[in-house]
């Protein structure tokens, strides 16, 4: 059952994104025209700045990154855009491969990673700055809520 998936038809993808899979992963991609429209609203000064960076932490098939790449090509070389300006994270391996194909980068490019964005250290091939400055960050201690003595709790109002 593929009725929730309009992306495949438009983009020509062969990945089987069933309704069950879409329910599980939230793979409802932003239409390319909408991505292009949103990207066109980014101020020109930001697009022109070679130090600007853009991250999609749940990149799917790369619709946003592709729209950004297309817009940034008006001002920068493709290699600079891919190697210095764009970043993407995607959980599903097949989506990640499709995103890399569409962007024209290899699947082991350091900026486009297949990972859980909730766990990833956002290093993108570089040491994470905070580790250098603060030392290795340990596992946080589990939060224990304070215990409340029942007698000190306010009495119900009714
Ligand atoms: C709603 S789609 C959006 C894709 C893209 N940003 C777009 O607008 O077209 C969400 C994507 O996030 C991915 N995803 C879900 N949980 C994730 C996680 N924890 N880390 C990375 N990607 C995740 C899904 O596999 C799916 O491809």
Image (spheres, grey):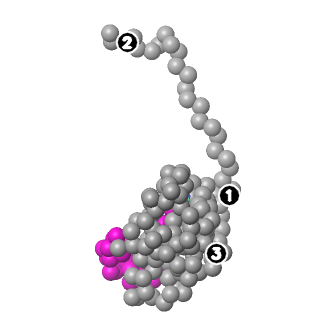
Task: First in sequence, mark 2 or 3: give its number.
Answer: 3
Could you tell me if residue 46 is visible in this image?
A: yes
Measuring from the top left, give residue 120's x and y in whole percent.
61, 59
Per the model, the C-alpha gap separating discs 2 and 3 is 60 Å
Is 155 displayed left or right of 133 in the figure? left
Question: Mark 2 and 3 residues: CB-CB less than 8 Å, in contact?
Answer: no
Measuring from the top left, give residue 41's x and y in whole percent.
30, 74
150 over 44 or under it: above or below: above
Q: Nearer the viewer, mark 2 or mark 3?
A: 3
Q: Nearer the viewer, mark 3 or mark 1?
A: 3
Q: Nearer the viewer, mark 2 or mark 1?
A: 2
Query: Magenta stretch: residue 130 in it?
Result: no
Measuring from the top left, give residue 128's x and y in whole percent.
62, 65
For the residue carrying disc 3, how many other residues have a C-alpha within 10 Å: few (<14), some (14-19), or many (20+)? some
For the residue carrying disc 2, how many other residues have a C-alpha within 10 Å: few (<14), some (14-19), or many (20+)? few
Question: Mark 3 and 1 residues: CB-CB less than 8 Å, in contact?
Answer: no
Residue 135's quadrant in the figure?
A: bottom right
In the rendered structure, which segment of residues is drawn in magenta? Answer: 34-59
Front residue of this view, candidates 23 and 117: 23
x 63%, y 37%: residue: 142
Q: Which residue is the site of mark 3?
A: 107
Q: Which residue is the site of mark 1?
A: 135
x 49%, y 10%: residue: 151
């Amino acid at each position: 059952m593929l009725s929730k998936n309009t992306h495949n038809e438009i983009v020509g993808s062969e990945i089987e994104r069933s309704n069950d899979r879409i329910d599980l992963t939230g793979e409802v991609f932003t239409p390319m025209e909408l991505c292009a429209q949103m990207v066109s609203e980014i101020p020109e000064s930001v697009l022109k700045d070679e130090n600007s960076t853009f991250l999609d932490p749940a990149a799917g098939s790369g619709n946003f990154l592709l729209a950004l790449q297309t817009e940034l090509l008006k001002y920068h070389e493709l290699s600079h855009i891919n190697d210095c300006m764009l970043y993407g994270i995607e959980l599903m391996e097949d989506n990640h491969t499709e995103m890399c194909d569409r962007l024209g980068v290899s699947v082991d490019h350091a900026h486009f990673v297949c990972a859980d964005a909730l766990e990833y250290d956002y290093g993108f091939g570089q040491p994470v700055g905070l580790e250098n400055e603060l030392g290795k960050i340990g596992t946080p201690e589990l939060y224990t809520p304070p215990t409340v003595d029942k007698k000190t709790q306010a009495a119900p109002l009714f």
